[in-house]
Amino acid sequence: GAGVSQSPRYKVAKRGQDVALRCDPISGHVSLFWYQQALGQGPEFLTYFQNEAQLDKSGLPSDRFFAERPEGSVSTLKIQRTQQEDSAVYLCASSVPTSGGLTGELFFGEGSRLTVL
Amino acid sequence: GENVEQHPSTLSVQEGDSAVIKCTYSDSASNYFPWYKQELGKGPQLIIDIRSNVGEKKDQRIAVTLNKTAKHFSLHITETQPEDSAVYFCAASIGISNTGNQFYFGTGTSLTVIP
């Protein structure tokens, strides 16, 4: 497809279960971001990849959160032993730098809504 | 780290009137300021952005102004239409792609345009 694709769109998990959220960025986009968006709030940064390298993971809230992008394209955000406070929409975005090396437009997927019971 | 504040949180305007949303930021290193529109159940979509080397940018009915000294930037929508109703987010970042830079988002403004 032409845009950023995320799956699943909706996920309900029991507390303590592990979940995996997938992001398929726009082809050729080297930069990939994960954001967490709580209800009524703005997106909060989780982690950033440039190709397969995870350059910044300072926003991951705990060691239960793990992200990877092994081949520099598809990325997976994994949450282990889910807690109720993990309930949120998880947004993935990709971008490509401008010719001058500046940050380009972020293209967001539609998000994965996680509900932890 | 960067702190972005956005006001108002909700805004209702009559169709055809103008809407203004304001944001402030704290980190003087930030130099890229995009605005996103988010419709229900969708991801945010870029509507306009500005870099710190300019003070104003306009695209049809949408304009953004930036005051680097005061560290604030604003979104202006003129001749509002019902389809402008959505949540709008401002953001700030360092704007250099290879620094692993973060985008810091405001808390959003829910705009309702009343027909």
Image (tube, grey):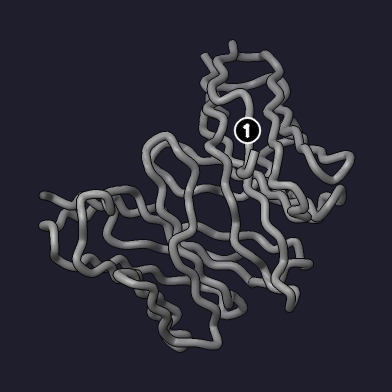
> Which of these two is toward me, A94 or A2?
A2
Image-based side of B37 in relation to A10, left or right: left
Q: Indicate the position of residue B34 as horizontal and vertical percent values.
A: 50, 66
Task: Tell me the quarter of the picture where residue A80 sits.
Answer: top right
Image point (41%, 77%), residue name? B72
Q: Indicate the position of residue A99 as horizontal and vertical percent values.
A: 74, 75
Task: Tell me the quarter of the picture where residue A65 sits.
Answer: top right
Above or below, comparing residue A8 to residue A107 in the picture: above
Q: How many marks?
A: 1
The residue at the far top in this view is A14
Image point (45%, 67%), residue name? B48
Above or below, comparing residue A17 to residue B18 in the picture: above
Helix, strand or loop at mark 1: strand
Q: Chain of mark 1?
A: A
Q: Amino acid at mark 1?
A: Gln
Above or below, comparing residue A67 to residue A104 in the picture: above
> Which of these two is toward me, A43 or A51?
A51
Image point (39%, 73%), residue name? B59
Q: Indicate the position of residue A98 as horizontal and vertical percent values.
A: 70, 71
Q: Which residue is mark 1?
A: A6
Residue B74 is at least partly visible in this image: no
